[in-house]
Image (tube, rainbow, N blue to C red):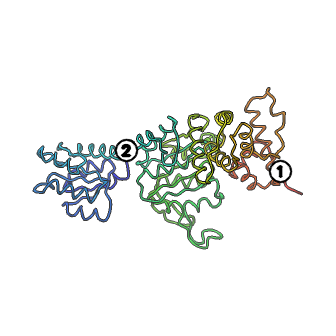
Amino acid sequence: MPDEVLKTFLIDCKEARGPLEKLGIKLRSFSSLERALHALHAQDAGAVVLSGRCLKGRDVPDTLQTLRRRAPRTTIVVWAPRMRSGLVRAALMNGATDVVLDRSASALAETLETTLTKHLVLPPLDRLRRTRERGRPFHGLVSRSDAMWDLFETCVRVAPTDATVLILGETGTGKERLARALHKLSRRAGRWVAVNCGAVPEALLESELFGHEKGAFTGAARAKTGLFRHADGGTLFLDEVGNMPLEAQFSLLRTLQEGTVRPVGAQDQIPVNVRIVAATNESLEASVADGSFREDLLYRLDVIRLVVPALRERRDDILHLFSHFSRKFSKYHAREVPELSAAFTDCVLQHRWPGNVRELENFVERMVLTHRGKPLDRRDFNRLCRGVVHEETSPPLAAAQLDTSKTLAEVLEATERQFVERCLRKHKGRIQETADALDVNRRTLLRKLKKHGLDKRRFRPD
């Protein structure tokens, strides 16, 4: 049920309280319209339900217009089984969202639930349709792919709810932008707060998320609120959630189940109202299988799953995004939009873009900054790619890896092992430096070392 439904004002219709509360709706009852109007000064309401009795003897148009001015975005439902048709028409023309003529309170409850859902979802869907027709971005996400716009529609539908969302997709596909769009469309009054679970040291992650008391551990010179309480009433985005250590996973599971946090070193639980959006570029099912991720936490996070397709899976977007970024960076850097040859364009379309939209964006900015005025050809594309993928002085991969008798998986595994080994040697076995160079987090690198049988001590100087 959307958050707005939890703030419903009942005006002179106490008999509707029971059926509405069965839907999980929290209510405030008022005996008169004047008291409700006074309360609307202090807080918003997702819905106002007023009885026909309350309107009796009043100027219906003037009364509803006054209520509408006080609550311009609020659903207003009139429950009036005996209201004359003329007054019903006047109510609907002057601000009422709906008029319920059925005597039963259960009919009112059903109408209220349906009306709220419709008015929360349909206008954003209509705006989404107009946005696509006009070729505009969706909250910063540029696409003409049917798969992406289907994803945007799902985002609009689930945003007003409190459901936890899990966003899957490769690095650079725009998972955080999609999560931000969910928050903007959610109408949650609190903050948007983001944390990369792989970038925070394991020993500090629980303190970062849940806070700590003064003196809870060495170095805790003062108490810390924690990101959950900082995001209270809003959205907390957990990026790279698959890299969360098991102890922090248990604390997160408890928070999702109970709606409370307990700071490190504290005795009491503190209530929080936070919508969780998590993201990962790894398979959480595989992490569950190898014991590095809790299965019960996966079920809690995976209420709504949004899978962002890789750029190579939506070929229509490649040139569309390329053109968009070319105009953007040419304007930003005060340069001319580079002229492209047919061969260069073919290379753009055929490239797999392993870094997805982020790689393409960086590629285009480099292209704009290094362009010398002549049309770009295949050689220019290869030069720009080398700048993205590896240093020109790097030695070539072993020829044995290109043995066509091997499977693709074997070739990729051998290439990965050699590349990790090369980086370890370059950084003298220092794990964090190597992880930064590979653009992975520390835990991912340690798993790869275990997978390939590499010992960091081999690469340290004597």
Q: Quadrant of residue 451?
A: top right
Percent from the top left, x then y, of residue 284? 60, 42
Name the residue beneath numbered marker 2: 121
Amino acid type assigned to the residue bearing label 2 in the image: Val
Q: Secondary structure at mark 1?
A: helix
Residue 123, given in percent of the width and then of the height, sits at 36, 45
Question: Amino acid under label 1?
Answer: Arg
Can residue 351 be seen in the rendering of this structure? no
Q: CA distance from mark 1 to mark 2?
A: 55 Å
Mark carried by residue 180: none
Q: Is residue 400 above or below residue 362?
A: above
Question: Farthest bottom residue?
Answer: 221
Residue 176 lies, with reference to residue 153, above or below; the image says: below
Residue 118 lies left or right of residue 224; in this view the side is: left
- The residue to which callout 1 is attached is 425
Q: Is residue 458 left or right of residue 249?
A: right
Left or right for 243, reference 255? right
Task: Rate crowding at label 2 as few (under 14), some (14 to 19) or many (20 or more) other CA atoms within 10 Å.
Answer: some
- Do the residues bearing badges 1 and 2 touch, measured as CB atoms within 8 Å? no
